[in-house]
Image (cartoon, grey):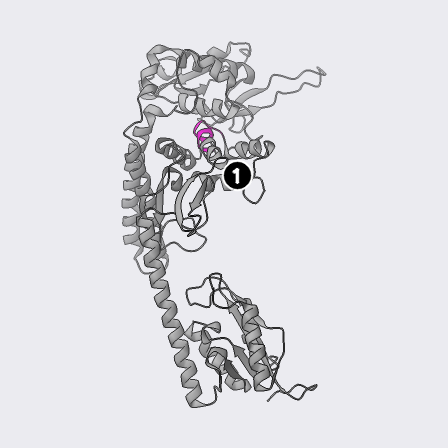
Amino acid sequence: MTHSPATGLVIARDLVRVSHTDREKSPDDQHADHARSAERMGWELQGPSYRDLGSASRFATKDREDFERLVADLEAGTFGASILMMWENSRGSRKESEWLRLIELAEARGVRFWIDVRGRLMDPADPHDRRDLVHAAADAAFEAGLLSVRTRRGTAGAARAGLPHGRVLTGYQRVYNEHTRKFEAQIPHPEEGPLITELFDRVDRGHTQRSIAMDWERRGITDRRGKPYPPDALKTLLTNEAYIGVRIHDPGRKPGSRRLSPLAERAPGAWPALVDPAVFWRVQKRLRDNAALTARPGGTKHLLSGLGVCHVCGSLIRRRAGRRYPSRPGYAAPVTYACSAAGGCARVPLAELDQLVTAVALAYLADERNYDAFRQAQEGHAAELEQIAAELAEIARDLEELLTERDAGRIKPASAARGEAAFEQRAEKLRAREAELLRPAELAGLIEPGPDVAARWKAATFDTHRATLRVLLRTEHLGQLRILPIGRGNGKAPVRDRIHLCRGEECRTGPCAA
């Protein structure tokens, strides 16, 4: 038995713990009770205490550092006391394995337990005391299990009722009864709510996450910690269905994971939406297609880079610097768009092509005959688009689970290959239907047709210009932009003669007719 050299008293140390929701005894209150019990029993309570903040339940996900330190000290023989004081058994652990390990180490080191609420000293080397300690561990684990079941049922019920859960989402604030402090409503935040609406509207118009993040930083817009929004944080906001009034309950999702599990359930949320569902699902399509949100600011500086192809080899066109001539100091050939293949098949002056394609696009959008192609309303499609997005997400989860089972050897490769092909076939049909629903309104939020289109183009951003041209330079609209080789000696040929807008199978003009 360990005694204090100064007083000759038996030395005791204590373990104090409080969970984030514990309202019974604080760590300081527990330590004070231990000190009074030690004085009454004639022991010397030495410190520092082992302080454990967090849940001791088997359902806990965070490490309990001081509990681990206590176990390590007992294993290493550096505990330095004969008695371990706790306020109650559950302050040790609600995990049977941890509690049994603690009992075994205490027995090996000759350490006894003092349980303050029972006013009893228990020796793990005594068969009767050991049985009581083991039974207490089982009881604590049983209570933790019941509490977890009640909590899960309560959370699931609240989810089906559409009630919010967890931290208050950016863009909203919660209202509580001033007397009972019970939740009453979740409503739009007067400052954050308009920012969320702006975020979705700007992405819908073709702005990139990074350009929005940089603009918000210049405007002094910060998150709740006072820090600027990084692009990745904006993407997290952009994919949250809560902004269209949807409550998701997913008991199968792993902590820290953004991917929904097969157990995920959706219900109408008991709060007003900040974003129109049609806008939300168009934004999801942009995110999936890696269209408007992947360009780095300064990465794509030129209007048509990557939006046209070489008519000879099909390579994308890129900006290429003009050649310099040593015999003509100060002179450089014009900057061009050129075939990105080695050697290059064709090129055309950059500034002139930008000007020509912009003029053609504006004329197309200002032509009344093209209005109907883009004015078909997307009304009535939002629910179907939402269902398609949910089915695509479900297919992705099922496919991932299938591949995991295959890699683990629980499914034969041939069977997995057939299943994978079936999933891909279903996904392809869904994506085709999604494209069909979105196509009539694919310029919604960008630069839409109308007689004043030139003024709106001038006021729009570079990102919006590129996003609009990305839609128009397709075979069903203006046609695919193709750069033609012109041969030697024809460098002064008009730009209009050096390009072709191909309409695919319907194209029966120019080089496509040959």
Label 1 SS: helix
Q: Is residue 425 left or right of residue 348?
A: left
> Which residue occupies the foreground of this view, 509 or 267?
267
Q: Is residue 38 left or right of residue 328?
A: left
Compared to residue 475, the image places residue 433 above or below, namely: below
- Can you give x and y, in whole percent of width and height, for residue 101 in the image? 47, 78
Compared to residue 451, the image places residue 403 above or below, namely: below
- Can you give x and y, in whole percent of width and height, for residue 215 in the image? 56, 31
Q: Residue at x 28, y 33 (%)?
A: 433
Quadrant assignment for the N terminus: bottom right
Q: Residue at x 41, y 17 (%)?
A: 501
Q: Amino acid at mark 1?
A: Pro
Q: Is residue 118 left or right of residue 391?
A: right
Residue 435's quadrant in the figure?
A: top left
Q: Is residue 267 visible?
A: yes
Q: Residue at x 47, y 32 (%)?
A: 194
Categorize mark 1 by other alpha carbons within 10 Å: few (<14), some (14-19), many (20+). Answer: some
Quadrant assignment for the C terminus: top left
> Which residue occupies the foreground of this view, 272 or 97?
272
- Can you give x and y, in whole percent of width and height, for residue 242 in the image? 39, 41
Q: Is residue 206 magenta?
A: yes
Residue that extends furthest to the front in the rendered view of this protein: 179
Q: Residue at x 56, y 20 (%)?
A: 336
> Which residue occupies the foreground of this view, 232 or 415?
232
Q: Is residue 216 magenta?
A: no
Looking at the rendered structure, the number of numbered marks drawn on it comes to: 1
Residue to which mark 1 is pinned: 231
Main SS, magenta residues: helix
The residue range painted magenta reads 199-207
